[in-house]
Image: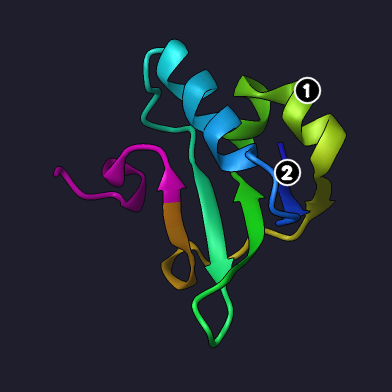
Amino acid sequence: MPWYRAIDSGSSLQDEFQNIWAAGGGPVDAALFGLRDASNKLTELYFNPAAARLAPHLVATYAHECPEPNIRNLVLLSGDQRIYGGNS
């Protein structure tokens, strides 16, 4: 399943996903990432494949399919730190 990217438009998309993620039991494999610009403003949001499955209506409404980004270059906005492959 692909990754999806949304442009941050000042909406509560991050909060909406956090609520869905928590209600779904906080699945370790589902995460929402963000990209910040030079002024630390959040400009892009990335749904990994598991996040897209967890919140299909958000993806359908706000996002478009994109190539898989390097998550090490992104900020974890909602999800479990173990998404990076660690144990903490």
Q: Which dot, 2 or 1, sits closer to the camera?
A: 1
Amino acid found under the numbered disc labelled 2:
Pro
- Give the image location of residue 14, x and y in percent: 56, 41
Closer to the N terminus: mark 2 or mark 1? 2
* Label 2, residues with CA under 10 Å away: few <14, some 14-19, many ≥20: few
Residue at the (33%, 52%) spot, across then down: 84
- Give the image location of residue 71, x and y in percent: 48, 62
Determine the secondary structure under disc 1: helix
Determine the secondary structure under disc 2: loop
Q: In this figure, which residue is indicated by the disc labeled 1?
A: 57
Amino acid found under the numbered disc labelled 1:
His
The relative height of residue 42 versus residue 22 in the rendered view (above or below) is: below
- Rounded to the nearest angstrom, the CA distance separating label 2 from label 1 is 15 Å
Q: In this figure, which residue is indicated by the disc labeled 2?
A: 2
* Residues in magenta, as a range: 77-88
Q: Is residue 17 magenta?
A: no
Query: Looking at this view, is 12 or 30 the one in front?
Result: 12
Residue at the (21%, 49%) spot, across then down: 86
Q: Quadrant of the C terminus?
A: top left
Residue at the (77%, 34%) spot, across then down: 59
